[in-house]
Image (cartoon, rainbow, N blue to C red):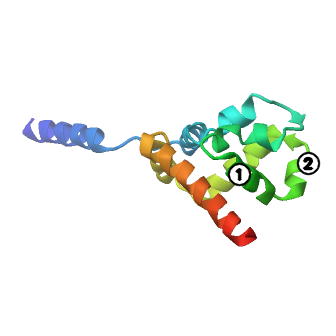
């Protein structure tokens, strides 16, 4: 009886201590939303032409007009003129991220980019990239 009770307690402790396995697809979706990709791409649907200003409106919202222009001009012209297949873009984005990051890493990234500091860091990185483009062009 004592042995059975000990085994049951051990099994229940083991069951309680195991953490649920993260779902990489679910964590990708969280990150996709945190980065604002859902708002940018999903509302358009299908294959359409989108102006760079519209496509990057959320991303560029905190930048000056000059920084916005430089950012857009730094994009490859083919990318700016070809129609965008929204669903295909998300699949490519997802496939690449899932090949580079584990479910745990996606969770950490989604947690970070969902936070105020993550959003601030995301905008700061964009501004830094624009500054680099300005210095290289100037």
Instruction: Name the foreground residue: 18 vs 111.
Output: 111
Q: Which mark is residue 77?
A: none
Q: Farthest residue toward the top?
A: 43
**Foreground residue among 83 and 85:** 83
**Residue 104, percent across and down?**
46, 51
Q: x, y percentage for residue 16?
A: 27, 38
Question: Looking at the rendering, in which quadrant would you find the C terminus?
Answer: bottom right
Measured in 3D between alpha carbons, the distance from the residue under mark 2 to the one under mark 1, in whole angstroms, is 21 Å
Mark 2 or 1 closer to N-term?
1
Q: Which residue is rendered at x = 86% and y = 49% of the image?
A: 80
Question: Residue 29: horizontal and vertical position, in percent?
Answer: 59, 38
Query: Where does label 2 land, which residue?
Result: 81
- Within 10 Å of disc 2 (Cα), the crowding (few <14, some 14-19, many 20+) is few
Report which residue position mark 1 lands on.
Answer: 66
Q: Given contact means CB atoms under 8 Å apart, are the residues at marks 2 and 1 in contact?
A: no
Taking 87 as reference, is 106 above or below it?
below
């Amino acid at each position: 009886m004592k042995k059975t009770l000990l085994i049951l307690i051990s099994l229940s402790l083991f069951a309680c201590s195991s953490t649920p396995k993260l779902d990489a697809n679910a964590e990708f979706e969280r990150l996709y939303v945190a980065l604002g990709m859902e708002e940018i791409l999903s509302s358009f649907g299908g294959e359409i032409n989108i102006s760079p200003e519209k496509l990057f409106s959320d991303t560029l919202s905190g930048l000056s007009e000059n920084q916005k222009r430089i950012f857009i001009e730094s994009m490859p012209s083919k990318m700016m003129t070809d129609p965008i297949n929204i669903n295909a873009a998300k699949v490519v984005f997802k496939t690449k991220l899932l090949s580079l990051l584990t479910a745990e890493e996606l969770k950490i990234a989604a947690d970070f980019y969902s936070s105020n500091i993550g959003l601030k860091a995301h905008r700061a990185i964009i501004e830094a990239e624009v500054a680099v483009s300005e210095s290289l062009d100037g």
